[in-house]
Amino acid sequence: MSQDHETLDNLLRENRTFPPSTEFAENSNITADLYTQADADRLGFWEQQARELDWDTDFTEVLDWSDAPFAKWFVGGTLNVAYNCVDRHVHAGFGDQVAIRFEGEPGDQRNITYRELMGEVSKAANALQELGVTAGDRVAIYMPMIPEAVVAMLACARVGAAHSVVFAGFSAEALRSRIQDAQAKLVITVDGQNRRGSVMALKPAVDEAVAACPSVNNVLVVKRCGNDVTWGEKDVWWHEFVDQQSEEHTPLAFDSEHPLFILYTSGTTGKPKGILHTTGGYLTQVAYTHRVVFDLKPDSDVYWCTADIGWVTGHSYIVYGPLANRVTQVIYEGTPDTPGKDRWWDIVERHGVTTLYTAPTAIRTFMKWGDELPGSHDLSSLRLLGSVGEPINPEAWMWYREVIGGSNCPIVDTWWQTETGGIMISPIPSVTATKPGSAMRALPGIGLAIVDEQGTELGDGHGGFLVLTQPWPGMLRGIWGDDQRFVDTYWSKWPQYYFAGDGAKFDDDGAIWLLGRVDDVMNVSGHRISTTEVESALVSHSSVAEAAVVGASDDTTGQAIVAFVILRSGMDGADGTELVKELRNHVATEIGPIAKPRQIMIVPELPKTRSGKILRRLLQDVAEHRNIGDSTTLADPAVMNLISTGLEASSSDN
Ligand code: WTA
């Protein structure tokens, strides 16, 4: 677990609580009754949430769990996700409401109404069909935060093709492996994206990946930056091909369990897992949680989730949940420090953002940049703040509340995962008295427990492993192409429970404190990266014989990647500084810049047990500059001395 006992004890002494203001509670129609209703009849509760959507064919059964852990929700029902997110709002008379207020990094702006979005999605759906994409196919999307990314996702949903969005910061190699695993037929991308004031080409990475992917028939390219691109015979310009399509498209209804998307996430092995989500249950849960957790007011809120569509937060809380709920939202293309470090606060002020949903790593960065930047803007439009992706420390929580929220906005710290599809643990802002740093309790409809190694449920004041005790509508339906890995990863430690991989603790009042991953998955700036993935990237370099990677705590990014490498023989004379630089770049090429180790230490040995297992715990002590813990299980106890002394000679660069 990433936090030591001292921190934990401090957390558990946290006795500040912040109940919602009377005004906030009175203006909300969400009350504590929701918990009572869900407790009284859980499936009936979910049925009621599902009824908020437009179904083409009604479902006949809420949940079929007979083939556990493979769930079927809203059995027999059919619906179209894109219709639910767009068309139905137009038919209900909200065609002129702005769905997306887009702001590019250079400052270009574009408002897209629900009627316009319906036209764009329909055109793109027609284009996909003309390119031979049909229901059940897979489409890879490798795009920055521009409206066409949302349109592309919705167009896939509209024609029943599963999208696999690959974060645009991933390398060509990472893109290739994901395209191949899903056997994608089409890739949708851009020429380039605006980042920190310059144009970063994206198309070359796609060209490189697609060259090794015979499943891909076409590459559909949005012209975003106008940078030069190499043009191949599979390439099709979006503005030539999509724009000439008809704005009319009749959505087909798909089975509630029809695949909606695959999203790859790191597991404990080197191979990312393709998390599979389906249609009816997923949309039900993301729409419900978005409505309740963000106390949504579709007629007056301006919502802004700062995530990227390359991560699950972008899927569930930019695209599907918010649009199903007819939100007006801001989408911003660029980085928070361009042109100045107050860009976000400028956006909040100019767009009158009411609801801001972001990650602790961003909050900690803004804390470092100083109070003057947000202080120079009028942030009084804000009424609710959210946090996601990693534990938020009480200091950052208080800063967020006071400096950004003017001590006037409830904070919802939301715990969930790519696998859960939607938020599972969170305060309800109109109901819950929050504690700084705690995600508080399971949402109505969610069954959760904290258990010990034997699977025995623990009570208040105790910590252990977080498990989900009941199936939920947005749950993953499997790992793409690997049912066994799905069962082994999540359902084998305690077969009756879904094991989330996180440690957690109930405090004396029953509030939940998340304690970080208990497996070999790191959380860097809210992004999941497995230690094994980085290790494989390092050993694929010709000068590395062995590598061990740990996540060390970091003030800004939560955890930082620290690598220990043993060089191949004959490398003794190598220039350490140069080599470390080269290895960091090599990891960026293999995985992406987000996986670059903060620090690489060249060591003569690694600490191993007699059975050859690397004791990462000891390396973590080194990486976090602690006294080295119990090393009696080492095959060779002298190794730790060797490592500690060897460190003087090795280098780190940031
Ligand atoms: C961590 C992101 C503490 C956790 C939505 C989980 C959190 C992993 C929180 C999932 C939170 C997410 N407090 N930890 N509020 N939210 N996590 O799949 O370790 O990218 O298992 O989904 O992030 O990361 P993922």
Image: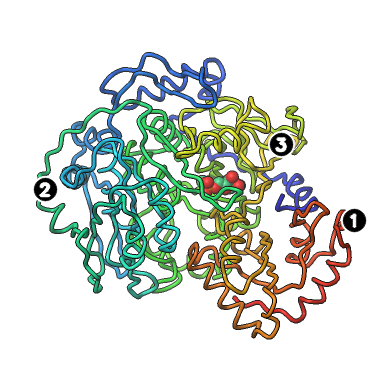
Q: Position of residue 647 (x, y in %)?
A: 76, 76
Going by the numbered disc 3, the residue's amino acid type is Phe
Mark 1 packing: few (<14 Cα in 10 Å), some, or many (20+)? few
Q: Which residue corresponds to mark 3?
A: 506
Q: Which residue corresponds to mark 2?
A: 245
Q: Position of residue 266 (x, y in %)?
A: 54, 50
Up/down of 42 relative to 25, above or below = above
Residues at marks 2 and 3 touching, judged by CB atoms closer than 8 Å: no
Disc nearest the viewer among 3 and 1: 1
Callout 3: helix, strand or loop? Answer: strand
Going by the numbered disc 2, the residue's amino acid type is Gln
Between the residue at mark 1 and the residue at mark 2, the CA separation in whole angstroms equals: 69 Å
Q: Which corner quadrant of the image does residue 135 belong to?
A: top left
Between the residue at mark 2 and the residue at mark 3, the CA separation in whole angstroms equals: 55 Å
Up/down of 450 relative to 39, above or below = below
Disc nearest the viewer among 1 and 2: 1
